[in-house]
Image: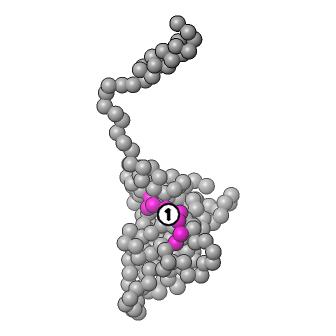
Amino acid sequence: MGSWRRVSLGAVVLLAGCTTAGPSAPQVDARAVTASAGAPTDATTGCGSRVETGPLPDWADAGFSGSTRMPHVFGANGEIVAVLFGHPLGLDGKNRSNNKILWVARPTATPSDAASRAALGITATLDGTGTRVIREVAGGPGPSIIDMPQAGCWRLELRWSGRTDTMELVYGES
């Protein structure tokens, strides 16, 4: 038997030993694994709203010039977008950028509720705990630095001008 045939026969034997007749492994939902595009997530709870990396929607790109491709997260109802200048978010900004977030609300056809507060109110709850913090962005949606006291998945309830939305942001160890 020539050396070429021995190599071919050896490859067939090796490949035959690598196959199984049992059931295949379950498929992993890629969205759960990559939902936050680089930031840590908890796939078992589905924590962390999807961080988009494409262009901002037209209604959210006012004031930007050039490319608007930047990390951003949509609220669950699509009423607000968080543009993440400090992505991934962390506990402090000592060795990286701050947790700078630009909040942009979707324009509405009806005027805002004048009786409601002008500020963007944020009630953040750490997933799986009773830890809750309140943050406020004066003047409503706009530029902010939003820090959290612990790493993990934070579920945000957002309120401004009589409107509401929610999202989840993951803060990692810095």
Residue 161 is at least partly visible in this image: yes
Q: Position of residue 49 (x, y in %)?
A: 44, 61
Whether 49 is among the magenta residues is yes
Q: Position of residue 24 (x, y in %)?
A: 34, 33
Secondary structure beneath label 1:
loop
Of the pair 107 and 141, the residue shown nearer to us: 107
Amino acid on which the number 1 mark rests in the picture: Glu
What span is colored magenta in the figure?
48-56
In percent of the image, x 55 and y 74: which residue is there? 102
Of the pair 85 and 153, the residue shown nearer to us: 85
In percent of the image, x 57 and y 59: which residue is there? 88
Q: Which residue is mark 1?
A: 52
Residue 123 is at least partly visible in this image: no
Secondary structure mostly seen in magenta is: loop
Numbered marks: total = 1
Residue projecting furthest to the top: 1
Q: Residues within 10 Å of mark 1 (few under 14, many from 20)?
A: some
